[in-house]
Image (cartoon, helix red, strand yellow):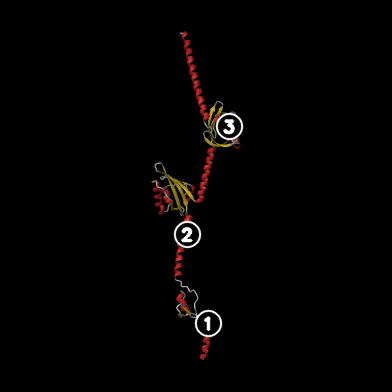
Amino acid sequence: MKGNTLPNTNEQLQRELAESKKLEQELLDLSSRQEAILAAVPELIMEVDNHNIYTWANQTGFAFFGDDVIGQNLHDLIALVRFRPAYHTAFRKFQQTGQGSAVGKILDLEALRKDGQEISVQLSLSAVQTNDGWHALGLIRDITERKRGEDLLREKERLLSESQRLGHIGSFFSELSGPMQWSDELYRLHGVSPETFTPSLESLLELIHPDDRQSMQDLFAASAAGEKSSALEFRINRPDGTMRYVRALGEVVLDSENRPIYMAGTVQDITESKLAEEESLRYSAELEKKNKELLDALANVKQLTGMLPICASCKKIRDDKGYWSAVESYIGKHSEAEFSHGLCPECEKKAYEDLKKLLKEDT
């Protein structure tokens, strides 16, 4: 029996050794795969120890901070100078408790590259307790381009909003059923607030002048049927009691089967131009009336023109037929003038003297 024990033990050791080598190879393969995966990750992955020193980083980390990143202080390497004192103070709490304002969260921060360039990063940290204290495992993503895109988008939105405000033009988006999306200017144009007003066809109709509501309903019905919409002018009654004239222009977007998907468009406040147009029409009508009255008056006017033959003695006027007429008779026939008889001061004085002389002769 004893003679068979040694060979059996040797065989067992060989099997265990083979399994150990196999396991070791599997671990090496797994480690290689993990290293390859970590090397391919575009984000920086790193570990810092309880003293805030880099102990490990993936390839992106080396490209990000340089080949000498291992052994350097995290905050001295990545943090902007003006933030470093606060970061160092916060890390002392992490050393004791494994807790901090950045642990377990995703934060957008400003950081430094190895060339000193300030960039925007997104940082997420987790805490791991080891034999030598709390370590931090972190992932850092460069979001500089995304931030620039967001800033550019915000600037474009600001410019669009300002342009709409100056032009009194609002914009809308509607899926033809349910709530709409309105721009800030469209809320202002209707005199409502996005905090208290939910735009929809039903709520919009409540703001539209009763005489114009059917036109808006017809427009939405035609759009829902896939018909091309045209511009529509209508009146809105604001909650403050004022009325505005607006002009809406929308476009329906269809899918590949010509079914309407949504409608987008603009609404412009045309109150000033509409009131000016109405005033112009009123003025034109009044002017036309005045012109007609003037033409009617001119048609009834008789004019005296040319040379008039008048007697130097009796002052009678000869007409174009050779007849002599008194001045007042001739003018009355050839104009609208009428005469009232009286005496001028000189004639009145002469008549008075003649009468006085006549009375004296009679006595």
- Residue 347 is marked as 1
Q: Which amino acid does label 2 sit on?
A: Ser
Q: Which amino acid does label 1 sit on?
A: Cys
Q: Which amino acid does label 3 sit on?
A: Phe
Mark 1: give few (<14), some (14-19) or many (20+) Cα within 10 Å.
few
Disc 1 element: helix
Q: Position of residue 17 (x, y in %)?
A: 49, 16
Disc 2 element: helix
Count all numbered tags in the image, as a single digit. 3
N-terminal label among 2 and 1: 2
Mark 3: give few (<14), some (14-19) or many (20+) Cα within 10 Å.
some
Question: Can you tell which of label 1 and label 3 is closer to the viewer?
Answer: 1
N-terminal label among 3 and 2: 3
Question: Can you tell which of label 3 and label 2 is closer to the viewer?
Answer: 2
Q: Position of residue 241 (x, y in %)?
A: 46, 54
> Do the residues under discs 1 and 3 have CB atoms within 8 angstroms?
no
**Residue underneath mark 2:** 280
Disc 3 element: helix
| Position above or below: 239 against 128 | below
Mark 2: give few (<14), some (14-19) or many (20+) Cα within 10 Å.
few
